[in-house]
Image (spheres, rainbow, N blue to C red):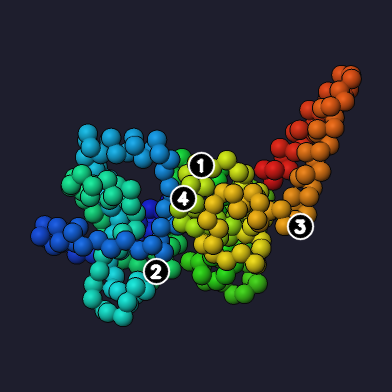
Amino acid sequence: MAKDFMSGIKKATAQIPTSTFSEVEKIKKQIVVIDELRQFITPLTTEELQILENNIKAQGCKDPLAIWETSHREAGIGDSDEIIHVLVDGHNRYNICTKYNIDFKITILKFEGIEKVKDFMIDYQLGRRNLTPEQLSFFRGLRYNREKGGKGKYDREEGSVDISKALAEEFNVSQRTIKNDGNFAKGVAKLIPELQQQVLAGNTSFNRTVIQDIGKRDDISEGSLVSVAQLGSDTIEDTHSPYLEEFSQRKKEIARLAANLSSKSDYSQLVQKVKELKKFITA
């Protein structure tokens, strides 16, 4: 994964002429942020964001921001062929530097369209070592959904490759996990942007299976869920999901065993059921 990412960096930066100081400063003052690309950025917790801010204020912005040199037309934000510079990586650093008027460096990248940018951003995030389980599931799911929908970076003939199997082997997980990741990514997309960031930053209390179930539903449009309360009431109570039904039955069985403990054998059975439930949830 790291090797592929570095190859992508070298390819993206190949044959890009060195900009003069004045050109770089002009670019830095005209950076464009596209909302469509925000979902491909790993959100930080409040604590992580504060640590990053403190470090930049104390030591400056050491890592360069990745910038896509393109046009309004190619970026899908207008009909003009005027050159613009779109922020690809470093959104949090950019916001902090802008807020406190701190200087930063940039790296100019070249891509053949916004879909290639998305592929690059997904691979970049999957190459990080500090992703939470939710973030890893989300980006694997994005990758799976894009490949399955024909938008991913690999050119394939329809039906020639079992995408879930290929990704399962790449990430050393089961095919079911990859498919669950795809539903999780779809479910996250049905939240409003602010709630998406809260979920991926780990600032909410509901579990991943709830969002996976939402991802399977066709009656909920993208960006429509505005609160955690909706996830717990309006949507889930009306969902007849075999997965959630089995989950509920397993919990009831554990509760029954816990309420009727009378021997060492009963305790061993309870422990086994709890282990099976944990395995079921993480499968």
Amino acid at pointer 3: His
Q: Which residue lies furthest to the bottom in this view?
A: 79
Instruction: Say which label, 3 or 1, has the lower sequence index.
Output: 1
Q: Distance between the residues labelled 1 and 2?
A: 28 Å
Amino acid at pointer 4: Gln
What residue did someone put label 2 on?
A: 114
- Residue closest to the eye, 42 or 197: 197
Residue drawn at (57%, 66%) of the image: 221
Is 138 drawn above or below residue 205 in the view shown? below
Instruction: Say which label, 1 or 2, has the lower sequence index.
Output: 2
| Quadrant in the rendering for residue 63 | top left
Mark 1, Cα crowd under 10 Å, few <14 / some 14-19 / many 20+, is some
Q: How far apart are marks 4 and 2 (CA)?
A: 22 Å
Q: Distance between the residues labelled 4 and 3?
A: 27 Å
What residue did someone put label 1 on?
A: 202
Instruction: Say which label, 3 or 2, has the lower sequence index.
Output: 2
Amino acid at pointer 2: Ile
Is the Cβ of the residue at disc 1 closer than 8 Å to that at disc 4? no
The answer to whether 124 appears left or right of 187 in the picture is left
| Quadrant in the rendering for residue 242 | bottom right
What residue did someone put label 4 on?
A: 197
- Please tell me whether mark 2 sits on a helix, a strand or a loop: helix
Please state the horizontal and vertical placement of residue 262, each as a whole percent of the image.
89, 20
The answer to whether 113 appears left or right of 212 in the picture is left
Please state the horizontal and vertical placement of residue 96, each as a whole percent of the image.
27, 45
